[in-house]
Image (tube, helix red, strand yellow):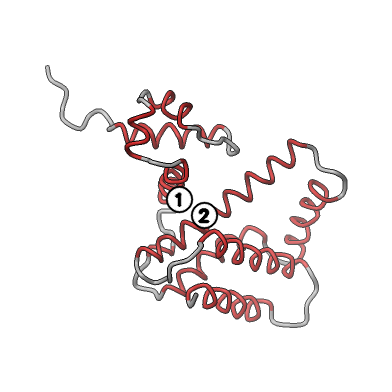
Amino acid sequence: MTEPTGARPSSRERILVAAATMLGEDPTARLSVRAVAARAGVSTGSLRHHFPTQHALQEAVLAGIYETVFPGDPIHDTALPARDRLVACLRQILAPAGTGKEARRVWATLYETYLACEPTEEARQAYLALERQMQHRVEYWLSVLGEEGELPRGDNSRRAKFLLTVVNGLMLERALPGAEDLLASETATLFAAADSVLRG
């Protein structure tokens, strides 16, 4: 009996699954060509055929993860203007921080883990992995807008770093006592940051 066509994943799919599995097991994994190819059961030449650079592989893996984990990701809602979609995405990063007492608890944990004393190498690597994941997530959103022609050509890495710096500041602001209406102030700041990036 012959196997139905398409029953076995393509080498490209096997590579993406292997790389995503490696990242799931260790978020700090470097996704070396040899390690991913071995895990996927393909040659390094086959991997390079589909993904000429490590960056191309990493971007494809992260795009797949984000589309699986965040299927309703606002960045794909083309009924909304690009700036609204980008702001909605940035709000996804802010949401888990909460406000007031909850935000202070989050910042207290961050302080104890990373600032109160010299962080261990393990803590440092964990933080860098989280930072990389956030950076890649924002770069992914920007790449979607770029493919749609909504974003001028440029360095999405630098743009993502800028947006994350704004988000980090807003997270801290949520934990501090403030006189202004937090939501209105935060919304204005997010739209200003999005406009800055989208206008180049």
Q: Which of 134 and 162 is in front in this view?
A: 162
The count of marks equals: 2
Secondary element type, mark 1: helix
Q: How far apart are marks 1 and 2 (CA)?
A: 8 Å
Q: Which of 183 and 61 is in front in this view?
A: 61
- Amino acid type, callout 1: Tyr
Residue lying furthest left = 1
Name the residue that disc number 2 marks.
137
Residue 97, how many percent across, how many down?
67, 60
Q: How crowded is mark 1: few (under 14 residues within 10 Å), some or many (20 or more)?
A: some
Residue 198, how many percent across, how many down?
48, 74
Residue lying furthest top = 1
Q: Nearer the viewer, residue 144 or 69?
A: 144
Residue 180 quadrant: bottom right
Of labels 1 and 2, earlier in sequence is 1
> On residue 66, which mark appears?
1
- Amino acid type, callout 2: Arg
Q: Is residue 1 left or right of residue 52?
A: left
Q: Is there CB contact under 8 Å for labels 1 and 2?
A: yes
